[in-house]
Image (cartoon, coloured by chain):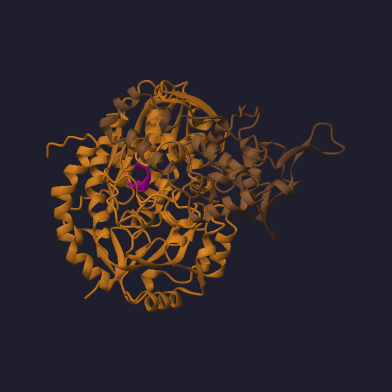
Amino acid sequence: MRLINSLAVILNDKCTGCKICSQVCPTLAITMEPVPGTKHKKLAVVEEENCTGCTACEQRCPFDAIEMTNLEESRMIGVDISLSNYEEVQKICYDAHLHPEQIVCYCTSTRADEVAAAILQGADTPDKISQRTGLRTGCTVECLQPAIRMLKSAGIELEAPKGRYQWYGETPTIWSIPDEVKEKYSKRGFHFDEDIEFLEKLRNAPLSSATCQLQVKGEEK
Amino acid sequence: MYPAPIKPLNPRPSRYGIDPSLVKNRFAELPEMTSLMLNELFPDVPDVIYPSSEGIYSIRRHAEAALEKVDLSMIQPNHTVNILASHHGFTLLGGEPYAELLKTVYDVVKQRTGAREVRLRAGVGLRFRETEEYIKRFELNKHFDRARGMAPIDEGIPIETEIGTLYGLKWTYDATWIIHVHNSDVREVHFHRQVDRAVKPFGMSYARIETRSTYHQNLGPRGANFTARAIFESEFVQSKFVGAVFLNMSPSGVISVEADNDLYKINDVITLSGLRHYGKVFQLLGEIDECIVGLDFPCPVPYVFSAGVIYCNFVGANCDLFDLDERLAPYTWYAEAMYGRDGKPLVSDVKPVNPAIKMVVHNYAWIGYPSAFFSQQVPTLVVGKEQADLFEHDSQNIEYMKYAMVADNLHDSMNFAYKTTGTDKVIVFDGAVGGINVSRSLADHLMEVAPSVSDKVDNILMPKWLKQRGILVNA
């Protein structure tokens, strides 16, 4: 769940149509639209419904052509986990080496099970996950990979968007580091195998009572 | 007779903090506060080259001397050079030493190589405009042929490494050569665990979101910083790497300027130096049994610092963060991830945050870093409704004020904190230079325990920490 209380606003007199804002927006809320009466000119347009107020566009605009404004009425976005089969949710998380309750976005406190539920409810790209859960709409930096790992464990093949750089793709994990690399650096203070063991322990930890209640609620539906 | 508190850095105008005029009072002005100099606590603190009577010229002089032994012969007049910088350096000692170091590196490279274009590329963390602010403040745009801030969401390039594809920022690598200019302040020891400290920016401020997310989500609490080494050792980065220049820091100031074509030589020097000089302060702060914490510095909540220790590491000071047998710091993102929906840790290995912290009074700190964990874990009072409003509308801190309370002013906040916690011990994270601002009661306590802390670090902990990192020291 993510509270949304601000919105990006384009200042048309400053916008040059450079597209950078649309290339970095994690929820694809900005498109470049033709300006009526001009031949080629396009300006950025914010689709308010998908804007989470993350400021990525405003902080990267080279022309200071975007302002953040506080919403008079805030709104919530989020995925109702109880609408998904929790066993399927758990399987996606498990295969991605995550505990379902693990926090995967430190800004929004989004948990792995909400992301998995979003995938089961049709979010098949990192951008759609962000639109529905709010993941990657805080700092917009640190939580890309869990989303990609979960999409992969759900069997979804990803193709990075062309001409934009919201995300490029999958990266290595601790489970994919070759043994010879681990051996090569074992004396320098890195603890790969012990960290794997620790993360496995987390993955296999029982659910909290709060999540068990959610699970029951879902079964009743 | 207790000495007066050290005057802290003034509030800075920034989009990430409240207007400086709204910071009405500072902790250092409170009557019960005093200061402890680090050389009183630990007589063996190293000599510093800055601050010094020579002023900022000392940084230039030492940098020029250190750069003399660095081979720049590969840089030809028709080449371009990117001097790589990171935001953290500008928060040390007011930022001037780091800015002067960058300017000196530029001057030396230009003079010795005649390179066509020498640019500044300054990376950030999660505040994408931060180095743009520093570039203007220190007029780096006037000194360099070009200067720009770069953010992790800017366009990237794939980098093939021995563990697979990672991604760097295109702006980092769009020159013939790169020079890595950084500092040794241990800072986020909860993330890097003082393993490959010198290499970290290759996995952070010079890197794309994919790489940063790999660091914080795909590896583990004691393997994360390998992301940086993987990138640095790639054929691509090595083909551009000239060398590195570092401000070698201690909690009391700059010890030296280190420069070398071999980053790992610098890494060994600063690892040792960091363990030795910061280790004692970490251990000392870990001896505090109860206290009120004051946040009072122009930085995001976890990064405000006291005697070189950032606040979030005081939150973990009930653990020895340098000890690699400690698998998880009480505060690190891997730990934060492990709190379940009911607010309790999912596994028993997650240690509680430092129980000595009874209350936090947030007088002045910035947004731009996810900080809700801190107000969730420790009772927090935020001074001023403007500051509360700033946090409430920060996309990284939507929940910070959900757990914190708002107070009208610092004096009332402290009266409330004294009354409700029952302690009069106060430690202030205000970046005081050369020492630490504390209440008189805490000053007495720290002076009493400092000698035994010093002995423990010298005789027990240092040998252990070094062995864990494969560093052999003869003396």
Q: Quadrant of residue B111?
A: top left
Looking at this rendering, what residue extends furthest in the front direction? A220
Residue pictured at 56% horizontal, 44% vertical: A140
Q: Is residue B176 toward the left or the right of residue B460 in the image?
A: right
Task: Kindly indicate which chain is depicted in orange in the rendered structure.
Answer: B
Of the 4 image quadrants, the one containing the C terminus of chain B is: top left
Residue pictured at 48% horizontal, 71% vertical: B24
Looking at this rendering, what residue extends furthest in the right direction? A37
Q: Is residue A123 toward the left or the right of residue B111 in the image?
A: right
Can the viewer see residue A25 in this picture? no
Task: Kindly indicate which chain is depicted in brown in the rendered structure.
Answer: A
- Queried whether the magenta region covers residue B22, the answer comes back as no
Of the 4 image quadrants, the one containing the N terminus of chain B is: bottom left
Q: Which is nearer the eye, B142 or B234?
A: B234
Q: Which is nearer the eye, B459 or B358?
A: B358
Q: Which is nearer the eye, A97 or B260?
A: A97
Instruction: Note whether B430 is above or below A119 in the view shown.
Output: below
How many marks the image carries: the answer is 0
Residue range corresponding to the magenta coloring: B186-192
Q: Position of residue B107 (x, y in %)?
A: 40, 35
Q: Position of residue A194 (x, y in %)?
A: 32, 37
- Queried whether the magenta region covers residue B191, the answer comes back as yes
Q: Is residue A75 toward the left or the right of residue B417 in the image?
A: right
Instruction: Note whether B236 is above or below A86 in the view shown.
Output: above
Q: Position of residue B432 (x, y in %)?
A: 34, 60
Q: Position of residue B325 (x, y in %)?
A: 26, 43
Can the viewer see residue A87 in this picture? yes
